[in-house]
Image (cartoon, rainbow, N blue to C red):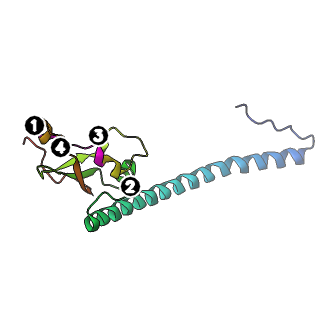
Amino acid sequence: MAPKYHPTPVSGSHRKALQKELRAARGMTGILAAQSDEMRAKADALIRQADRLLCESWNERMWADGEPIDPSPTVDQAINGGFPWLEIECSRCRVKRDVSLAELPHVVSTCIHDLATRLRCERCAKGGKRPLATLLQLAPGQRHAPEGL
């Protein structure tokens, strides 16, 4: 974009006034940009806190009711809120394991409760079975050791 052209006034006092206004406008851009950055940082922190509270609320409802609750946080909200792990349990062999939400292929708007139909037990799949996994809760860290260790 081409710089804005300000025609130079004929009189000296008008030229000085124009230069003064241009300096003030250029100085104000730095101030406004700094305020914008500060507000964005505060907004990001508030969004992260809101996502964390949403995940904690969903965990409590899952514990109380025991089934995938709709509405649930999206995968991105869970990761942003500090809950990047999903604890699941095989409905057949009752083995619990953790799934990293960051490693799952997902769309931005994928809800956690929609993952219940996609997740399967790896141990039972080796035996030719394909039981669904039961969602337990979101976790801030990995709780169960990976299989094979």
Return the x and y of residue 42 as percentages of the image width and height: 48, 59
- In front: mark 2 or mark 4? 4
Labels 1 and 2: the sequence-earlier one: 2
Labels 4 and 3: the sequence-earlier one: 3
- In front: mark 2 or mark 3? 2
Residue receiving disc 2? 73
**Badge 2 vs badge 3, beta-carbon distance below 8 Å:** no
Labels 2 and 4: the sequence-earlier one: 2
Give the image quarter of residue 58.
Answer: bottom left
Labels 2 and 3: the sequence-earlier one: 2
Residue receiving disc 4? 121
Residue receiving disc 3? 103
The residue drawn where x is 17% and y is 43% is: 121
The residue drawn where x is 82% and y is 46% is: 18
The residue drawn where x is 89% and y is 41% is: 9
Q: Secondary structure at mark 2?
A: loop
Return the x and y of residue 86 as percentages of the image width and height: 26, 51
Find the magenta span and give its range: 116-123
The residue drawn where x is 39% and y is 51% is: 74
